[in-house]
Amino acid sequence: MLSYFHIILIVILIGLIFLFVKLKYIKHKLVWILLLVFVLAVYLGFILSIAGQNVDLKTPEGAKLAIKLYLGWVGNSFTNLKSLTGQAVKLDWKALNETDPNKTNELNAQAERDKYRKRVTK
């Protein structure tokens, strides 16, 4: 997971960006906040995607492996997002709660038959 070094680095990064934001005009705050969120998301995504893989970032082979793992993780995330979006589009998002008259009539007829059967069997 995240070591103390990573947590301290994240806190320092957040502190520096917010300190810089305080020194700039108000209209630039949103840009810096979005940039901060993006940098933190990329950093945490990278750290979490290589966690538990015994990757040595000090060697070129380890760095290549870490980049492959991260890009695979990002690609898989987009595939999952595509699947999630496709499933959400298939849902019924109508504003009105309408019922199909044919289905309603069938259900009413079934309910009447059930009432009749209960009376007959008593």
Image (cartoon, rainbow, N blue to C red):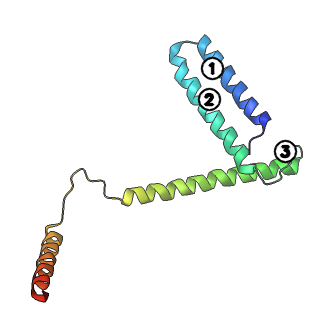
Q: What amino acid type should be assigned to the residue bearing mark 2?
A: Leu
Tag 2 secondary structure: helix
Q: Are dots 3 and 2 in contact, CB under 8 Å?
A: no
On residue 57, which mark appears? Answer: 3
Residue 20's x, y, as percent?
Answer: 64, 16
Side of 1 where 34 appears, left or right: left
Instruction: Give above or below for 23 relative to 60.
Output: above
Could you give the CA–CA distance between mark 1 and mark 3, rounded to whole angstroms?
A: 29 Å
Residue at position x 69%, y 20% from top? 16
Q: Are dots 1 and 2 in contact, CB under 8 Å?
A: yes
Tag 1 secondary structure: helix
Tag 3 secondary structure: loop
Q: Of callouts 1 and 2, which one flags the residue occurring earlier in the amino acid sequence?
A: 1
Q: Which residue is mark 1?
A: 18
Side of 45 where 60 appears, left or right: right
Q: What amino acid type should be assigned to the residue bearing mark 3?
A: Leu
At label 2, counting other C-alpha atoms closer than 10 Å, the crowd grade (few under 14, some 14-19, many 20 or more) is some
At label 3, counting other C-alpha atoms closer than 10 Å, the crowd grade (few under 14, some 14-19, many 20 or more) is few
Q: On the image, which quarter does residue 8 sit in? A: top right
On residue 36, which mark appears? Answer: 2
Side of 51 where 73 appears, left or right: left
Q: Of callouts 3 and 2, which one flags the residue occurring earlier in the amino acid sequence?
A: 2
Q: Of callouts 1 and 3, which one flags the residue occurring earlier in the amino acid sequence?
A: 1
Instruction: Give above or below for 14 relative to 43.
Output: above
Q: On the image, which quarter does residue 91 sit in? A: bottom left
Instruction: Give above or below for 6 relative to 62.
Output: above
Residue 118's x, y, as percent?
Answer: 14, 83
Q: What amino acid type should be assigned to the residue bearing mark 1?
A: Phe
Could you give the CA–CA distance between mark 1 and mark 2, rounded to whole angstroms?
A: 9 Å
Residue at position x 43%, y 60% from top? 87
Q: The C terminus lies in which quarter of the figure?
A: bottom left
